[in-house]
Amino acid sequence: MVLVALPLTVRSAVAEIDAPDKLKAAYILSFAKLISWPQDVLPSKNANLVFCAAATESLTNELRNHSGKTIQGHRVQIVALGKHGDSLGCHIVYIDPQHSFRWFERVERIKGQLWVGEEEGFINKGGVINFYIDGEKLRFEISVEHAKDSSLDISSRLLNLAKIVGDIEEGGKQ
């Protein structure tokens, strides 16, 4: 077996992370497998798990490739949010750097929403999970405080893979 390392670079603090959108989409879907939503937000196995993307067409299309699959017994639904998209009904909201300044200006945290982004300062703006580059690897950080504020329960398996921002005892399930 031959492993190929892809060089990943950061173009600027507010630019998108130069990692393949396919990889980012895979991470985002994997996050959903290791997070529990409140019963009143994701009530039954018949309810869709709604991924919303305020992102490039490329990343949105990579997410759409997983539409209809099942995660934790819920059918995956992908919704593209425009510049002024409404995230009501979304369980996971991916916000790229081109949309984040508009997003955080007008949106308050909604119970049960996982906000995922990829820019320096995303966690400080209220995000729960943020991608970043460490050397040549795509990594992510998690704010357990923001997860708790969103009533999300993050598996210790996911927390063990992340750089933690905040108190692990408050936001993760052991």
Image (cartoon, grey):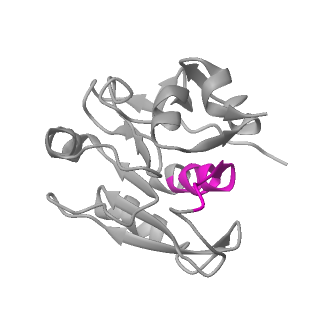
- Examine the rendered structure and indicate whether residue 93 appears above or below residue 42: above
- x then y, percent, for residue 92: 46, 55
Q: Which quarter of the picture shows residue 66?
A: bottom right
Q: Is residue 101 magenta?
A: no
Front residue of 168/68: it is 168
- x then y, percent, for residue 156: 74, 34
Q: Taken as a whole, is the magenta stretch helix, strand or loop? A: helix
Q: Is residue 170 left or right of residue 91?
A: right
Residue most extreme to the right: 1
The boundaries of the magenta stretch are: 25-39
- x then y, percent, for residue 4: 67, 42
Q: Which quarter of the picture shows residue 144?
A: top right
- Examine the rendered structure and indicate whether residue 95 appears above or below residue 118: below
Q: Which quarter of the picture shows residue 13?
A: top left
Q: Is residue 164 left or right of residue 173?
A: left
Residue under the point 30% across and 45% down: 96
Q: Quadrant of the C terminus?
A: top right
How many badges with numbers are in the image? 0
- x then y, percent, for residue 152: 56, 44
Residue under the point 50% across and 49% down: 24
Q: Is residue 158 left or right of residue 66?
A: right
Q: Is residue 29 magenta?
A: yes
